[in-house]
Image (tube, rainbow, N blue to C red):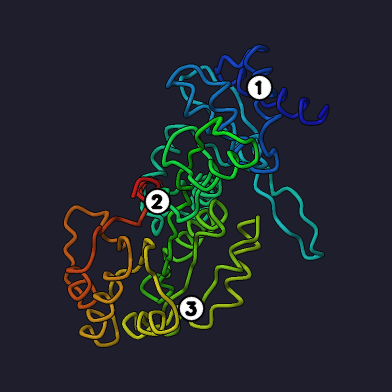
Amino acid sequence: MDELAATMTGFARTLRAAGVGADHERTQNLLKALDHLDVTDPGEVYWAGRLTLCATPDDLPRYDRCFAAYFGGLRAVSTRTASVSVTRHLATRDADGETGDDDGTAAPATASRIEVLRHRDVARLSEAEREEVHRMLALLRAGRARRRSRRFESSHRGVLDRRRTIREALRKGDVARLRHRRHTTRPRKVVLFVDVSGSMAPYAETLLRFAHALVRSEPRATRVYSVGTRLTPITAELRHRDPGTALNAVSRTVPDWSGGTRLGEELRAFLTRSSARGEIAVIASDGWERGDPELLGTQMARLSRQAYRVIWVNPHKGYADYQPLTGGMRAALPYLDDLVAGHSLAAYEQLSERLAHA
């Protein structure tokens, strides 16, 4: 606990240097909050700090930048301007496999630049910018809508629990109190299909990192499949806590990277072996179907009859002039509840909110 206190005190000091009023009282509130949370979960630490250390809207972009800097191997530097400047020293690996600093060059970034990154197409980002987006995706708290289950729990209000009331009356000799019960709730299940074909190559890794955030948030209520020329379940690989390790496991499992897309055949295989009854089905693809579009339309109709909601995530939907003209999109469109963008961090955040309130 002393180590945790020292770490968070250092983080508060970094925030103060960046212009956030993270004083002693706010820092103590943060430490009290962390006593009730999992401090190994970056998302819980992030929100605990954001709720206790920030006081104004201007604090939020500075806090986000400092959090990434302090806990992501970066160094935050205070400036006299309204924005927060962060310098990241790049590391290189020498021939012996040892990691060391590079020539000392650094990549400066500002909070306003991070806001720009949230809305930029990930296919057009540099490698360093894409890593920054992936780091923020790892902090995404992917909420989930709740559904009523068949099970009951004791409650002060609700339906009269006749069995429990009678049993207690027989035990005590009279009816001392009426007992009630209500249905419990469970997170709405999600089944996610991620297109890993050649046309989706610029977006596949970021989509899989979003899938990792979904699995980490609700591991028992999320299933993920890669689709291309084969349907491959990858949920188990995405359950690893570290996103990089999870993605490496996925890369070894998926046999059809950068191939074509035969989504109709793969949905037929999925619906033959499994079911999406009552689940939110999310398909992340650009709709370039190499198989029979009529088959895709038939399988989408089957899927829509089973699923609670069908959401199609298309990276090109993020552009104002986009029209769903490909054969796959035309076949699927009549059976979709939502067609949403999937080209940027902001789009993935909006998709997460949609899943949280579906």
Residue at the spot x=82%, y=64% of the render? Answer: 96
Tag 3 near tag 1, CB within 8 Å: no
Residue 348: which numbered mark, if any?
2
**What is the C-alpha distance between the residues marked 3 and 2?**
22 Å
Which of pointers 1 and 2 lies earlier in the amino acid sequence?
Answer: 1
Residue count near mark 1 (Cα–Cα under 10 Å), binned few <14, some 14–19, many ≥20: many
Whether 173 is drawn above or below 238: the answer is above
Name the spot of residue 219 as percent of width and height, x first.
56, 58
Residue 45, given in percent of the width and then of the height, sits at 63, 35
Task: Identify which amino acid the numbered label 3 is placed on.
Answer: Trp
CA separation in Å, label 3 and label 1 = 44 Å
- Locate residue 257 relative to residue 89 in the image: left or right: left
What amino acid is at disc 2? Tyr
The secondary element bearing badge 1 is classed as helix
Pick whichever, 100 or 256, lies toward us: 256
Q: Secondary structure at mark 2?
A: helix
The residue indicated by pointer 1 is: 12
Q: Quadrant of residue 313?
A: bottom left
Q: Residue at x 40, y 44 (%)?
A: 118
Q: Which mark is residue 257?
A: 3
In-front residue for pair 184/240? 184
Structural distance between the alpha carbons of marks 1 and 2: 29 Å
Q: Is residue 185 visible?
A: yes
